[in-house]
Image (tube, rainbow, N blue to C red):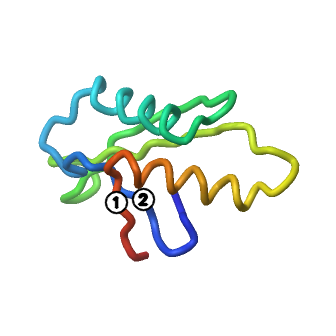
Amino acid sequence: MDSGGGWIRSPQNHCATTPPSRQIVNSAKDIVTAAQLQEATAGYSFVSCANENEPPYQVALYMSFRLPHDDWVRYLRDVAAGMLDRGWTQVAI
């Protein structure tokens, strides 16, 4: 998630040899809780860290949620701040 100064990275290892689906779902739930997202939906896919098809894999998590009509920029910054408060880290892009 772009927080204006970079992307937010999970506090968990982002490139494990066999990331369990439960870890991915729990991370998505953590984002929804930390950011107090409304009407959130998510999906994920595994992406190779080595090349196109070989392990280890990292996970791409795709989320959708309702944005308020007013001041949605501040809302997205609040989402990023909530994630940072829960142990996610900001990385430069």
SS type, badge 2 = strand
Q: Which residue was labeled with disc 1? A: 89
Q: From the viewer's perspective, is residue 10 above or below residue 39? A: below
Three-letter residue code for mark 2: Ile
Residue at the left extreme of this rendering: 17
Question: Which one is earlier in the sequence, the residue at label 1 or at label 2?
Answer: 2
Mark 1–mark 2 distance (CA, rounded to whole Å): 5 Å
Which residue lies at the image location 41% right of the left edge and 55% below the top edge?
A: 84
Q: x, y (%) of residue 4?
A: 57, 71
91 sits left or right of 34 in the view: left
Q: Which mark is residue 15?
A: none
Q: Give the quadrant of the C terminus.
A: bottom left
Q: Which residue was labeled with disc 2? A: 8
Three-letter residue code for mark 1: Thr
Which residue lies at the image location 33% right of the left edge and 44% below the top edge?
A: 59
Residue at the front extreme of this rendering: 85
SS type, badge 1 = strand
Q: From the viewer's perspective, is residue 3 above or below residue 93? A: above
Within 10 angstroms of label 1, few (less than 14), some, or many (20 or more) residues?
some
Which residue lies at the image location 44% right of the left edge and 34% below the top edge?
A: 28
Q: From the viewer's perspective, is residue 72 above or below residue 42? A: below
Q: x, y (%) of residue 82?
A: 49, 48
44 sits left or right of 13 in the view: right
Which residue lies at the image location 31% right of the left edge and 50% below the top edge?
A: 87
The answer to whether the residues at label 1 and label 2 have Cβ atoms under 8 Å apart is: yes
78 sits left or right of 93 in the view: right
Q: x, y (%) of residue 1?
A: 51, 56
Residue at the right extreme of this rendering: 69
Q: x, y (%) of residue 39?
A: 68, 27
Within 10 angstroms of label 2, few (less than 14), some, or many (20 or more) residues?
many
**Viewer-proximal residue among 23 and 48:** 23
